[in-house]
Amino acid sequence: MLQDLLILMRAELMLILIIFLLLFLKLGSASLRNETVMNMVNGLLLVVLALGFLVKDSGMIFGNMFRTDDLLRLEKNMLTLGTLIISLQSYQWLKKHDQAMEFYLLMLSTLLGMFFMLSAANLLMFYLGLELSTIPLAAMVNFDFNKKQSSEAGFKMIVSSAFASGLLLFGISWLYGTTGTIDFSGLAASLDGSPLQLFAFITLVAGFGFKISAVPFHLWTADVYEGAPVPVTSYLSVISKGAVLFVFTSVLYSVFHAMGTVWYNMIFIIAVATMITGNLFALRQDNLKRFLAFSSIAQVGFMLVGISGQSREGAAALIFFVLIYIFSNLAAFGVITLVSSASGRERISDYRGFYQSNPALTWILAIALFSLAGIPPTAGFFGKFFLILAGAGKGNWLLITIAALNMIISLYYYLRIIKAMFMEHNASPLAKVDIPFSPRIALAICVAGILITGLYSGAYQYIYQLLS
Amino acid sequence: MVSISHILLLSTALFFIGMYGLFTRRNMIAMLMSIELILNSININFVAFNKYLWPGRLDGIFFTIFIITIAAAEAAIAIAIIINLYRSQLSIDAEDATELKY
């Protein structure tokens, strides 16, 4: 039993150890320099990542509330890698911050919550993981204490996420009432599609929709992304969204398998609305963080197209796309973090003539944007290709046509930034930004990830083979 | 004898009252209170289902206890954020938090 616990939960236990270590260091009034804390946490996160790759095993513990297998471990490793990249990127910002240790406490708590949420085999465990991963996030959003924007964003985040979890719980309570069980396997066996269960399912999807910011539940996204500090924005848009998408897919595919046609229609409408709204609003943004917020809404729309495929290909394409999305979005956010902490500028118009002063960063941002737009040599193309291919499996050509048209619209706004950086001449461009060691590694990992997953298809094959 | 439909009527009404309050109240503390109403209506749901329909196991009661705990954590963070916001804008009216808009 103890051995099972130690092996199956090793990543979670390691994270808990790090959290307590930080807590005791903080309480023990040891005056560590921020750099020391950051290097220590980065090293320990690397250990978590390595532990995830070590032993292969699967099983269930805690009275079948916690399950783990190779696929879940892969997903957790992706999230850990993303967190590590963000932690490396936030070096410049965190170095000057007084509360670096608290920042890591909150960030690792949310990561722990996501791990538990992914591993949940029971609605109670799932709910606890979800809350552990959202409540500290609201505190992280409010981490620029003396900026009003940041507190405002934090308030919007906590209210909308509390409302979303209220909706989710309302759905869960009705599901419990109609089936008498909160185990995923028990639920899957006893769902019969009665009207009450449909109602419960709709509120459940609404709750999920808030967390992944699908239209019509997306209104908080842009405000929160703009107000939060840049590293937190990247964490929100990549890691927390990715984790909820993984769980959403597995819940739809395994628990609500019996209600396939119902949720296909819902996902169809939500996907179309999400893609169109995200794209149209992204067209008119000038703040880069806001722009990336709407672009990430549009990307969620594409992911929903993949989910709607209801096949093994659909799940594999989603996981593959989230991997690519981690690399591309974090590369873009890495550049923005560096520029924002050096000069405080976040508008697209500030980036005019960026190539004159920072050729290397311009290229990184350009590769990231090409990947987000889905242009062939980069990984984003294959990600979107597999998503749309999976969506086409159902033979709904309307959905595929709309998705393809939206990809073309999205090219316009991604290329607009690239044009501003490369082609427009600016008499006084942004000053040269120097890249310290840690962000340099993070950006290198991201660019390598974008190019390697683009040119080598092993990752998709591997994920596909894990989904049995 | 109170039947389960009475209790469910109460909890559903409470849920939508909370939702209405969340959408119409402009005072941040009142919005938080509305969220508490929503969560409490769910607690009533769970306890009622557990008692009337599935008395054999304690799943519903456990869920309720965890919801109460988490609601407290949520309120703690939310109030901390509201205090922080109050420091910069000297009011807790949601209409005054207008820095982030389209």
Image (cartoon, coloured by chain):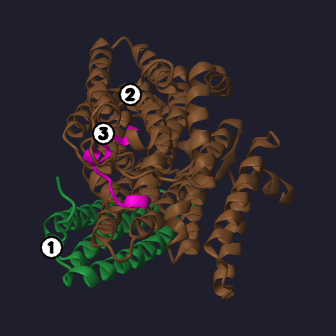
Chain colours: A brown, B green
Q: Are marks 1 and 2 on the same chain?
A: no
Q: In the image, which is nearer the foreground, mark 1 or mark 3?
A: 1
Q: Which mark is residue A144?
A: none
Q: Please identify, in this view, whether the residue under mark 1 or under mark 2 is nearer the observer.
A: 2
Query: From the viewer's perspective, is A98 left or right of A207?
Result: right
Return the disc, 2 or 3, that comes first in the chain's sequence: 3
**Callout 2: chain:** A
Q: Is residue A125 visible?
A: no
Amino acid type at mark 2? Ala
Of the residues shown, which amino acid type is indicated by label 3? Pro
For the image, the number of numbered tags is 3
The residue type indicated by label 1 comes to Asp
2 and 3 marks in contact (CB < 8 Å): no
- Residue placed at 54% from the left, 58% from the top? A129
Residue A235 locus on image (x, y percent): 48, 53
Circle 2 is placed at which residue position? A373
- Between A265 and A306, the residue placed more toward the observer is A306
Q: Which residues are magenta?
A: A342-355
User: Which residue is denoted by mark 1 in the rendering?
Assistant: B96
